[in-house]
Amino acid sequence: MIIAFLSLWFLYNGYAAGRNLMRRDGNSRLIQSLQSLLVLLALYWAWTTGILFRGLWAPSDVILALVLGHLIFALSLIITHQHGPTVLELFLDIRGLAAFLNKAPGISVRFFGVAVIEELIYRAAAQSMLHLYFDNHLTAILITSVCFCLLHDHFFKNGVVSALEFALFTLCLSVLYYYTFSLILVIVVHWVRNIESAYLDYCALLEDTHDEEEALRRLDGQHGAPTLEYP
């Protein structure tokens, strides 16, 4: 099971890295097939190892993840934007974020689904299997984090600072999972990052269009409905 999953997983990540480096679309049918197979194998692994039952819906983990996710995203903005007052304003804008979630429930649900699938594959399955295979948690964390970066095209095209920030965020997810062993915690932290990033995009579009419906329409077009963040 471990060898089969990791072989497919490395193949998938290698294909993603090649496509992202060459800026090509690639074979969508092949990648969707690999995604589906990885999801099924990850679900089977999580079920048989008890990961799906280990406090999956613990309210304390969800609350902690919401707080951590918001703090981690603020730190990410400090790295990428490097302007304290703007970051503080965004950090305190809970009411605006809540209003956005109310206006765009489809995007919220979509991003939650992405977070569930990616954390299931990368943290619950791949990181756990790598830990068992190498008998070394640091090796498992580093390999998982590197592969997660390779999956995302924005890691390659948004500049060195953004790439560094994303690598640190990815490491943070892997470390959180290692120390808490809570799948729901990393899912929610991941979701918070995605939804707050979408909120920033929405604010920029709203400033550009001065029309809420048009801003939401454009935002929905930017964030399609991929199975994973790498289509």
Image: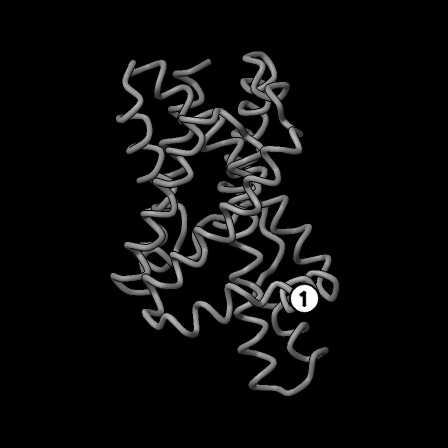
In this picture, residue 186 sits left or right of residue 57: left
Graded by Cα atoms within 10 Å as few (under 14), some (14 to 19) or many (20 or more), the crowding at tag 1 reads many
The structure residue drawn at horizontal position 32% and vertical position 47%, both measured from the top left corner, is 168
Residue type at the position of mark 1: Phe
Against 191, residue 11 (above or below) is above
Q: Where is residue 21 in the image (x, y as percent from the top left)?
A: 30, 55
Name the residue beneath numbered marker 1: 100
Against 208, residue 153 (above or below) is above
Against 90, residue 121 (above or below) is above
Can see residue 157?
Answer: no
Q: Where is residue 1 in the image (x, y as percent from the top left)?
A: 46, 13
The structure residue drawn at horizontal position 63% and vertical position 54%, both measured from the top left corner, is 225
Q: Position of residue 111 (x, y in %)?
A: 60, 51
Q: How many labels does the image show?
A: 1
Can see residue 101?
Answer: yes
Q: Position of residue 179 (x, y in %)?
A: 41, 26
Q: Can you tell which quarter of the image residue 3 is in?
A: top left
Against 224, residue 46 (above or below) is above
Protein image colouring: one colour
In this picture, residue 48 sits left or right of residue 141: right
In this picture, residue 3 sits left or right of residue 121: left
The structure residue drawn at horizontal position 32% and vertical position 26%, both measured from the top left corner, is 140
The structure residue drawn at horizontal position 31% and vertical position 22%, both measured from the top left corner, is 137
Looking at this view, is 4 or 71 the one in front?
71
Secondary structure under badge 1?
helix
Looking at this view, is 5 or 223 the one in front?
223
